[in-house]
Image: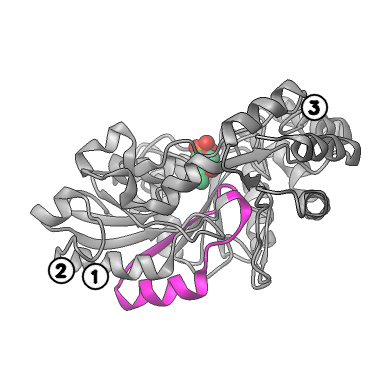
């Protein structure tokens, strides 16, 4: 049994993917070939965003809007400590300070009330309102942006987050690396009225390529133009005129070509993921000590992960492994206590919900092709476990 099975999808799409790869090998435009523009149009159409700008990874997708907005030293960027490292890494990479806001205990996404308190605490330099990084108290920081993460495929609470951000003049960048294909109140993720949204096409994400890749979505024409420049070394009207400092952040033509057939079947795969998640829900209901995930009624999860909570998590994971079932822990250590952020001066219980989740979370095998017989086995092992 595989934790995420990529081979079944490949067997299904093999002729289409191979034909696309062959076409690229024949035309030879390996950098910014026609498949890149074709994919960008298809991505924009599938989300409703005006612009989709592909790039080299989900991390570059997060980095480039921060560069475009000139976010840097002295700026505060708010995000969750219960996410993949890249979300906060890009904030530090541009020289800004991550201000962590604890998560909602049900959705595991950034708490809107927590965000509001954190913004006020930064403005007032008052750590009694919200646990602040040392620099926010000693030198003061300017609140500039918030990066909500749609963790495991479930959208953050945008109808509450966006008005708070608007009131305080913050830019909003949705990190939908785990949620492409999901919806919030019927709207496709990456098509919400955020200033920018990003996703990752890392192979294991709900929509993956066969290497690294990512994309940025925005309705803002000026931002889109700056992002297209940033991803090619800050080019101006041509490649050898440089008007800003950028990066080499392009997506390979081959990866774009591989993704085109995958994007076509994404809606079907998202539907299959709902069936798998429902199958887990039925089988896990009533097993003592197991808390299955809860999706708010107004969200359609992309189900990047199916994560349960269990107090004796490590022992359960070992029991499943012994029974041939792979599991994963996202995330064993919240970001506010990572050693690279020691200078922020946080204690683990500054973000108590994230700290607790990191000890109890366990992700079970999840992909659109998971068989019912495998789900039976996984859930029988969990039900039989006494520990
Ligand atoms: C995977 C992921 C990223 C980074 O994407 P890469 O393509 O691996 O660079 C960023 N944020 C979140 C929440 C992720 O899950």
Disc 3, disc 2: CB below 8 Å?
A: no
Label located before the other in sequence (3 or 2): 3
- The residue that disc 3 covers is 1
Query: Of all residues shown, which one is farthest toward the front?
Result: 386
- For ligand 1, tell me if the residue under mark 2 lies within 8 Å: no
Q: Secondary structure at mark 3?
A: loop
Q: Secondary structure at mark 2?
A: helix
Q: Residue 212: which quarter of the image?
A: top right
* Crowd tier of the residue under label 3, counting other residues whose Cα lies within 10 Å: few below 14, some 14–19, many 20 or above: few
Region of the chain picked out in magenta, as a range: 152-178
Q: Residue 325: which quarter of the image?
A: top right
List x then y, in percent, for residue 114.
36, 65
List x then y, in percent, for residue 205.
64, 41
Image point (80%, 27%), residue name: 1
Disc 1, disc 2: CB below 8 Å?
A: yes
Q: CA distance from mark 3 to mark 2?
A: 53 Å
Q: CA distance from mark 1 to mark 2?
A: 6 Å
Residue 85 lies in the magenta-colored region: no
Q: In the displayed structure, would residue 102 be above or below residue 249?
A: below
- The residue that disc 1 covers is 120
Query: Closest to the observer: 66 or 314?
Result: 314
* Crowd tier of the residue under label 2, counting other residues whose Cα lies within 10 Å: few below 14, some 14–19, many 20 or above: some
Q: In the displayed structure, would residue 87 be above or below residue 76?
A: above
Label located before the other in sequence (3 or 1): 3
Q: CA distance from mark 3 to mark 1?
A: 48 Å
Query: Of all residues shown, which one is farthest toward the right?
Result: 373
Image point (46%, 65%), residue name: 221
- The residue that disc 2 covers is 124
Q: Secondary structure at mark 1?
A: helix
List x then y, in percent, for residue 185.
64, 73
> Is 222 displayed left or right of 20 in the figure?
left
């Amino acid at each position: 049994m595989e934790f995420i099975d990529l081979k079944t999808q490949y067997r299904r799409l093999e002729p289409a993917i191979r034909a696309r790869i062959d076409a690229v090998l024949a035309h030879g435009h390996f950098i910014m070939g026609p498949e890149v523009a074709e994919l960008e149009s298809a991505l924009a159409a599938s989300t409703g965003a005006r612009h989709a700008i592909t790039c080299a990874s989900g991390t570059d997708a997060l980095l480039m809007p921060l560069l475009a907005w000139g976010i840097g030293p002295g700026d505060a960027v708010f995000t969750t400590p219960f996410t993949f490292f890249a979300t906060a890494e890009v904030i530090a990479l541009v020289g800004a300070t991550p201000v962590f806001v604890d998560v909602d205990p049900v959705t595991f996404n950034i708490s809107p009330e927590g965000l509001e308190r954190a913004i006020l605490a930064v403005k007032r330099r008052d750590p009694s309102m919200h646990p602040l990084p040392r620099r926010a108290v000693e030198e003061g920081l300017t609140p500039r942006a918030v990066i909500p993460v749609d963790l495991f495929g479930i959208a953050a609470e945008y109808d509450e987050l966006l008005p708070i951000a608007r009131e305080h003049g913050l830019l909003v960048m949705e990190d939908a690396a785990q949620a492409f294909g999901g919806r919030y109140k019927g709207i496709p993720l990456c098509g919400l009225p955020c200033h920018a949204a990003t996703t990752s096409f890392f192979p294991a994400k709900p929509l993956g390529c066969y290497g690294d890749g990512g994309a940025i979505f925005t309705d803002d024409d000026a931002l889109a133009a700056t992002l297209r420049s940033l991803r090619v070394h800050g080019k101006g009207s041509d490649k050898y005129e440089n008007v800003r400092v950028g990066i080499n952040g392009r997506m390979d033509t081959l990866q774009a070509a591989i993704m085109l057939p995958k994007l076509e079947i994404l809606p079907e795969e998202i539907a299959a993921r709902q069936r798998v998640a429902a199958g887990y829900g039925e089988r896990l209901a009533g097993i003592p000590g197991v808390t299955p995930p809860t999706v708010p009624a107004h969200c359609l999860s992309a189900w990047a992960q199916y994560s349960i909570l269990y107090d004796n998590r490590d022992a359960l994971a070992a029991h499943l492994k012994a029974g041939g079932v792979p599991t994963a822990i996202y995330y064993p250590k919240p970001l506010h206590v990572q050693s690279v952020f020691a200078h922020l001066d946080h204690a683990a219980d500054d973000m108590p919900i994230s700290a607790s989740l990191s000890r109890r979370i366990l992700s079970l095998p999840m992909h659109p092709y998971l068989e019912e017989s495998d789900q039976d086995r996984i859930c029988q092992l969990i039900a039989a476990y006494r520990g």
